[in-house]
């Protein structure tokens, strides 16, 4: 049986008409056709309140939609996260989602680790796909790919997820249809490979 893949669609607009949605759909469709079990978590369609206090994070019960997401992520062998870049970072809704998901109780959740203790490897790999209007090289060079590194190292890596691969897709608002199709085909290839 092929591995289980969890796709986290992090675009905050639920209408599904953005290029980031097309990228995720291309990956998902190809992975399903290749025989992988794929579960998609569309963060924009989940209703959950923000965490406001440390006590809520440490001791509060996650809402049912977050528990469902934790189950999907916990069972998956590979995570694929799609996120647009907003003001140099991931959208606030996606950041809140990760704060909710990595609460105590999820195996490998950030709160399960004492300071100075290394995370146990989860045998779970990840890919982060970030789309943006600016050139991807500029994001990496000028901004240091800060939000990508924050998610990869400070959240996923801290919780024992790895290896973590990345794709930065710049100039997504371009009219260059060939360029856009090239990235869609690349996502299809990654989906077929379960990578």
Image (cartoon, grey):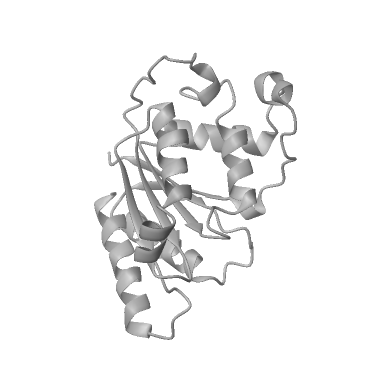
For residue 102, which quarter of the picture?
A: top right
Q: Where residue 50 appears, x then y in whole percent?
A: 73, 39
Q: Is residue 177 visible?
A: yes
Q: Is residue 27 visible?
A: no
- The quadrant of the image that shows the N terminus is top left
Q: Residue furthest front?
A: 142
Q: Where residue 159 appears, x then y in whole percent?
A: 43, 27
For residue 12, which quarter of the picture?
A: bottom right
Can you say whether 185 is above or below 9 in the image?
below
Residue at the (60%, 35%) spot, across then down = 99
Question: How many tags in the picture?
Answer: 0
Relative side of 40 to 181, left or right? right
Q: Where residue 4 appears, x then y in whole percent?
A: 37, 40
Relative side of 89 to 93, left or right? left
Closer to the camera in the image, 1 or 179: 179
Relative side of 47 to 146, left or right? right
Can you say whether 91 is above or below 116 in the image?
below
Residue at the (57%, 60%) spot, across then down = 86
Closer to the camera in the image, 99 or 185: 99
Q: Where residue 25 appears, x then y in whole percent?
A: 44, 63
Residue at the (48%, 65%) spot, across then down = 20
């Amino acid at each position: 049986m092929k591995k289980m893949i969890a796709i986290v669609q992090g675009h905050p607009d639920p209408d599904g008409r953005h290029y980031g949605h097309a990228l995720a759909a291309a990956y998902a469709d190809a992975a399903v056709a290749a025989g992988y079990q794929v579960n998609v978590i569309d963060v924009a369609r989940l209703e959950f309140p923000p965490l406001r206090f440390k006590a809520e994070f440490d001791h509060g019960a996650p809402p049912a939609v977050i528990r469902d997401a934790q189950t999907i992520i916990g069972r998956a062998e590979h995570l694929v996260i799609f996120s647009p870049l907003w003001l140099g970072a991931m959208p606030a809704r996606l950041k809140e989602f990760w704060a909710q998901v990595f609460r105590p109780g999820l195996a490998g959740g950030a709160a399960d680790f004492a300071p100075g203790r290394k995370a146990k490897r989860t045998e779970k790999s990840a890919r982060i796909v970030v789309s943006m209007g600016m050139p991807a090289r500029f994001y990496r060079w000028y901004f240091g790919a800060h939000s990508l590194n924050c998610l990869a190292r400070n959240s996923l890596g801290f919780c024992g997820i790895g290896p973590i691969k990345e794709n930065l897709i710049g100039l997504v608002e371009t009219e260059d249809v060939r360029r856009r199709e090239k990235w869609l085909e690349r996502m299809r290839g990654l989906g077929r490979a379960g990578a």
